[in-house]
Amino acid sequence: MRMRAMNGATSSARILRATAVVASAGLALSAALIPAAPAEAAQATVRIVWVSQADALGRVAVKVKCQPTGKHKKKTCTGTVRAKVGSLTSAKTKFAIKAKKAKTVRVKLSAKQLQAIHDAKGNQRKASFVVVGSAPKKSTVKKTRTVKIAAPLRVVLMDTQASQGGVGVSMTCVSSKTCKGSASITVGGKTSAKTSFSILPKQLKTYRLTLSAAQLAALNGAKGSALGARITAAVTAPLRLQVIGSGSLEIPADPTDPGDPVDPVDPGGGHDHGDGDDESPYSHAYREGASWTPSEYDTCTAAEHNEYAVIGPDGKLYPGWHPPVHERADGTTCAFGHEHGDDPRNSDIYAWAMEQYAAEAAAAPNNREIVTVDKAAGEYLDVATDRALGLPFGYGSERLTEYSNANPTGPNVHRHEDDPGHKVIVSNNQKLRDGSNTAIKFPNTFGAPTELACDYLMKMHQGSHSNDPTKNNTHELFYAVQCNDGTKIFATTMTNYGNANELHSSCTRPFSGGQSAPTAVPTIGSDLPRGDGGMRLIPTADCISKYTTNGTGVYRTSDAGAGTTDDRRGSPASQTNGWWWAGYERWQSFTSITDESGKEIVRYEPWFGLQNPVRYYVSNSGKKADGTADTAVARLNDLAWEEGYQLGWQPWASQRAASETKVDWKSPDAWFNGAIRDAWITAAKVDHQSGSSNALYITPWGKGARVEPFEGSLRIYVSRTTNTGYVLSTVPSLTSRHTRTGEALNRDASASAPKSMNFFYDYGKDKAGNPLGVHAPN
């Protein structure tokens, strides 16, 4: 479903125009006071000292002084104050002020006055404030000033296409008070029923407006052409005001599955060689309101997905983390069909990470005005956009585009990835172990050996459904860590997992029966640079044939001759419970951050595993949309309807029993959805004790760390410490994983998903084990 945004309008985007333009958050904007003229004060027993600007509730403060003279000099002044806007008059507010004293009287503007001021040019208009004294003697004084009224609410986004008899509309409450009221849509000369809304301060919320039968008839009569549409938001709190948003609406002529939300030339969400628009308010990842498009299996709208968007340090809008299931204002729920891993707010270092984003936003060259809402909770507001900062998905990719455009002589790489693949990993108070499964210890302040423990917050991109990782090695990685030895790292890089045009066969990992090193498989279709380390272990057709469809079933020596025994070589859901040899997918990252001299100051190598990837590599005989050579993949779910030993094993046996006809691999009924994952997390190495600053700027590749920013650079934070004396390796320990201790195997308290098969977390289910509608692409 296409969406339309309020700002950045272009003729091609058909962007929603708002007649209720808001200049800044909140209603009462300036505290400027208008003093009364001295001559006026001398002619009456009361005078107006000053008149304020309107506050968030539509009230204007008028300071009145009682100054009786002669025989009345000790008398109390009484009377009323009212406001006049053109021919519109507010209710009178009474006052009683002791002699020689002053008092602030608040006059509440009427709904008609508020609307008249708001609808005027610049949302401002002159108003007269009239003070009528009734005692100790009658007198009248008045003062005129310009009053500005900015709407407490914005109509931000509206679906451009009707879906299932309704329209998604997103509204933002920019006031410091909760916004309440009702919204309706007018199209084809007909107005829908009203839908009530209640939006917390500084929050965005999406509502679905139901179209009437007459409106649907008008849209159908247009035969695919768009009709003008107007959203009317009747705000009742914090004040009464009508806010209008206008655009157009249509019913699509062919409402079929819009396809995966990825680049049609590179279906893995891979390369994007466009120059982009650095001045756009949207990041490439946000795609001007369409970072994700619902499929036939999803019940949430794109507008509801946009509700979770966040502002990046550069002031652009980015997709952000959201739960797989969205709860609407009326208590009903809908499913997005994909998940983003752990809730980052569960991290013990989330607030610190957001503090770093806020610092980058406020510093040059961004120079954003940032307001701290709640430092302890990691809540920061970008004033210009009235939106909250957050963990921005695709921020590294955005900076890579800017960096590549600024350095045309280097590798001109543009890499933008799809929304569902962004995954968050949280691990709090993790104990670290070395390669022999021994606790890593460091000398504390008193010289006593202390076990190293760290808090981790990471966000990586791991697409599990397309052919993208069979050829492309570059993926965005956000990495934040704080340890009890003083180590602190905050960095976003475009990390290479091995080399481009190369994968390693999943069933040839060293722990799969004496194999000394995994087997490299040459692939085709990428022009990304070579990596410095790491690799991508991905299931191949050879692995599936050897261990699954034609599996021997021999796992232990005692199993010899067992033939079709279901074990973890051939099945991801076997009773032996372990990494699936044939198809367990493991992405081994490698990040080395160096300074301008080339010295390595930071290194980290977390690995990310997938127990139920959607695809497996077949060959290099595929074709891109432009006809050039590409890799080809097949779907693991489809094996339930193909001959082989797997038909007697899980999960294929259950899949086949549930349906004799093939289940769509993108359906929530498909077991292989990329949601069952684990993380191999180890200690990071830091060598920055002699550094001049904690805050540094690097290229998107993690190179050239320096104190001053440069075009396309990313701000990082590195503690001025060193741990090279006791962190001897950053490679995850196979020994530790085999014994099922350490290495992030016990993230139960911080993970947002239930544990699965001892090793993994299933993000396709809630904590009670209920499915969340997750499916490929995820």
Image: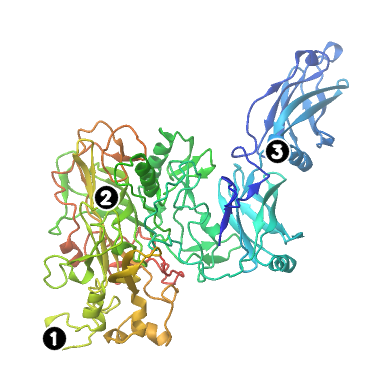
| Kind of residue at disc 3 | Gly
Q: Earlier in the sequence, mark 2 or mark 3?
A: 3
Image position of 64 with respect to 497: above or below: above
Q: Earlier in the sequence, mark 2 or mark 1?
A: 2
Mark 2 vs mark 1, foreground winner is 1
Q: Position of residue 666 (x, y in %)?
A: 43, 72
Snapshot quadrant of residue 518 = bottom left
Residue located beneath label 1 in the image: 560
**Residue ranking furthest to the front:** 627
Q: Quadrant of the C terminus?
A: bottom left
| Kind of residue at disc 2 | Cys
Residue located beneath label 2 in the image: 454
Crowd band around label 3 with a 10 angstrom C-alpha radius: few (<14), some (14–19), many (20+): many
Of helix, strand and loop, which one carries label 3?
loop
Image position of 709 with respect to 628: above or below: above
Residue located beneath label 3 in the image: 58
> Residue at image x 50%, y 71%?
297
| Kind of residue at disc 1 | Ala
Of helix, strand and loop, which one carries label 1?
loop
Q: Quadrant of the N terminus?
A: bottom right
Q: Which mark is on residue 413?
A: none
Q: Position of residue 431 (x, y in %)?
A: 23, 54
Is residue 739 visible from the viewing direction of this image? no
Crowd band around label 1 with a 10 angstrom C-alpha radius: few (<14), some (14–19), many (20+): few
Q: Position of residue 71 (x, y in %)?
A: 86, 12
Mark 3 vs mark 1, foreground winner is 1
**Residue ranking furthest to the right:** 138
Question: What whole-number distance in Å separates the C-alpha atoms at marks 3 and 1?
Answer: 82 Å
User: Horizontally, is 131 left or right of 766 in the view?
Assistant: right
